[in-house]
Image: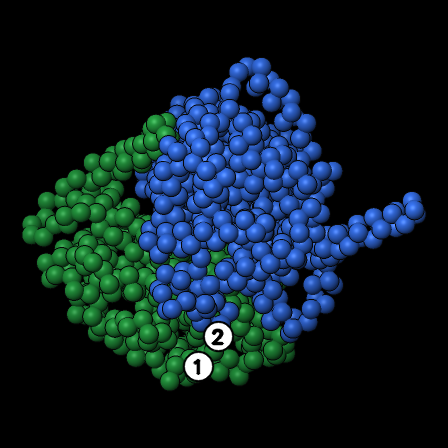
Chain colours: A green, B blue
Amino acid sequence: MKLGKKLLGLGIAAVVGIALTVSASAINSAEAGWEPKKPIEFVIMAGKGGGADKMARLLQTVIEKNGWSSKPLTPINKPGGSGAEALVHLNNASDPDHTIMVTLNSFYTTPMRQPKLGVDISTFTPIARMAEDTFLLWVNKDSGITTVEEFVAAAKAKGGDWIMAGTGKLSEDNLLTDFLNAAYDLDMKYVPYKGGGKVAKQLAGNHADSTVNNPSEQEGFYAAGTTVPLAAFTDNRLAMFPDAPTFGELGKEFVYYMQRSVVGAPGMSAEAATYYQELFAQVFASEEWASYRTKKSLQGELLQGDALMSYWMHERDVHRAMLQKMGAIE
Amino acid sequence: MEILANLIDGFFIAFEPLNLGLMVVGVVVGLFIGAMPGLGSVNGVAILLPMTFLVPPTSAIIFLAAIYYGAMYGGAISSIMLGIPGASTAVATTFDGRPLALKGEADKALIAAAVASFVGGTISIILFTLFAPPLADWALAFGDHELFALMMMAFATFVGLSGDDIPKTLFSICIGLVLSSVGLDIMSGEPRLVFFDIIGFMHGINFLVLAIGIYGIGEMLWTIESTRGEPSMSKAKISVDRIVSNLKEVSGTWVTALMASFVGFFVGILPAAGATPGSLMSYGFAKTYSKTPEEFGKGKVDGVVAPEAANNAASTGAMLPMLTLGIPGSPTTAILLGGMVIWGLVPGPMLFIEQEEFVWGLIASLYAANLFAAVINIGFIPMFLWMLKMPFTILAPGIFVLCIIGGFAPTQSMHDVWLMFGFGVAGYLMRKLDYPLAPAVLAIVLGPLAEPSLRQSLLISNGDITAFFTRPISGTFMAFAIFLLLLPIIKAVRARMVGNSSQ
């Protein structure tokens, strides 16, 4: 086994060596007060390659590239059970001062739908809301549809055969589809897929009639002219899609965002919370983050501490009402 | 001609000193990461992604693609030498690679793996170079019905083979399918089969946990029993004569290599499929059309060539939808895609037009990385053979440790390690009772692809099953799948008729 061990050693040495080079450049952010004493566990509430994952890796990169953290962030993906696994992991974190997580809207819905988990998000430590992602209504350009009016007419004509592809049952996409069905008296059929990328592909390949993707999921197809955004579920028109009105303009008041936030484990010390809040405020102000926000049409200002907690509590009530309406919870 | 000119430009980019250096380093790092059980190209690329900001995007993708390639080669090494799949993509390589090593022909298996990987890689890159944009359209045309029909075909290759006991094969497939349905069901939004409310089951059962359990722990238990503690020494040798004769034997499998390259590439292109199903399917196909299918699983060179050619071809294939459609074809390309976003590139149909240097630099570097990986891999073979000369009593604890690392690494949870032990014991018992294990592994890989696509198709066509047969691509696959399923019956009837007439 000598050689086997050597081999193993070599592999580890390679990885450690690389990790060292990365962290060597990252040594020293001369901040006063609390400092992490070991690598920070950076839990990602989604699978590798998804929207939340891409964002988490960007955050990690911005921090490490600029050397803002004396200890590296080690990302761990815990996509299981719509974030259930990640939430429980955070809830039971053995070292809350070194455990943070990138989260999205399943942060509200999963604990409500699975009360057995015993997760109460009001005990979690609010660090920073980095952005709110937007949703738009999309169709394939082959359909010839360019306005919501035409969309409604076409969907009505097809009735239950109109296919709306989305990401999983009772996900954000499902909430939006239910809204559209109710608001325009439609009977679209919701077909769930795993991940927004696959949903976008279904539309581009004409396997689905419409989707409610985030801009980042459709931007490639949009740039090529394959797909067309009809309207946005936002307060104002997005600079990236100036021709797509908001649903508000069309007389249907419906605004819905996906939070992109960083949350700390319950029981995190106040000093550590302050440290992470300052760290992510720094990231928020960085040029890299600003350009990413512009490119992906991200909305939402930086929210931290108590303001973030009251935002969560408000959103939780909104989602509870929506899930009740859908009959998913009592 | 334009393609040729672009490609030549690409080679100038790929052979810039920085890019060339990164390519060689990437291949070697990838080789070792791939050779470590449990760690595969996904981990390698994810760990090294933050490194890539120090260099321009083109150099960065060349580096990461080299790791991806190197890991594909490396995965075969521990599959063959230790019987533990080095990466999920190399699971099928253990089926015949391990028996070859046990027969003292590890060098043959390693050379076959390296040569097949090279062939698979090269053919797929040529296809990529020539047909990237039209192939992207083809991948888009693939809907749920087509994906399900393709999966049916893959299952059929494992059921319809002569040789194995068919009821036991079906049983093994069913076990795999049940295990693959553990976790959150996206179609209903509800968790399924979360035993005893243990939170670890929420993320489903990672099939690498099953594969390492069965092939690592199970194999070790089996060897301990069959050798009864006698220290067994492998007769692995290496010499120039052997290399030459091995190369000759490997070159006899060119038909398999060719078939596997095409299958691997086309399965790789399909969003979501990736290299693991591609390699398993090629193994099934190679066994189906072989004249001596009963030799598979007992150390047949074709059984190493097929999955290795396929997984390299698929890894190139998986880059195609990533670059042209912005949809990753495998977990590793999903991370690469994340990298591209961070570098400020927008993958999608416009990439080939707006970022010519990036695309062609990458394509050219794939040709070069493939060649380096093959040469470096063959160069390391004597070192790997050394390992096999250890007595089993020394090797076993090492394998045990590697299994634990492999079970822990992908999800970093102890839950999976315990699960792996459970599968190890179950796998050992199944083997004692003469159940084929490969179909269970196939099922747990393909189940999560087949099941949602079946339900999505039925939802779309209002529960109408005939849609699988009336759509052209899907219908062809289904017909072929049914033919494969009926093959044992046809063979039995024919055998009886021949038997009757000779009486």
Q: Can you see residue A140?
A: no
Q: Quadrant of the C terminus of chain A?
A: bottom left
Locate residue B308 relative to residue B163 in the image: left or right: left
Q: Is residue A157 left or right of residue A70?
A: right
* Cα distance in 3D space between marks 1 and 2: 11 Å
The answer to whether marks 1 and 2 mark residues whose Cβ atoms lie closer than 8 Å is: no
Which amino acid type is shown beneath numbered disc 2? Thr
- Foreground: A246 or B88? B88
Does residue B304 appear left or right of residue A98 in this picture?
Answer: right
Report the chain holding disc 2.
A
Residue B327 tag number: none
Give B422 or B479, whichever is nearer the viewer: B422
| Residue B452 x/y as whole percent | 55, 64
Residue A57 visible, this orientation: yes
A215 relative to B327, above or below:
below
Q: Which residue is mark 2?
A: A177
Which residue is tagged 1?
A326
**Identity, as a three-letter code, of the amino acid under mark 1:** Met
Pointer 2 local density, CA inside 10 Å: few below 14, some 14–19, many at least 20: many
Q: Residue, x 33% and y 74% (percent of image)?
A: A116
Q: Position of residue A170 (x, y in %)?
A: 44, 73
Neighbour tally class for label 1: few under 14, some 14-19, many 20 plus, Cα within 10 Å:
some
Element carrying mark 1: helix
Which residue is rendered at x = 45% and y = 67% of the image? B193
Q: Chain of mark 1?
A: A
Can you tell which quarter of the image residue B119 is in?
Answer: top right
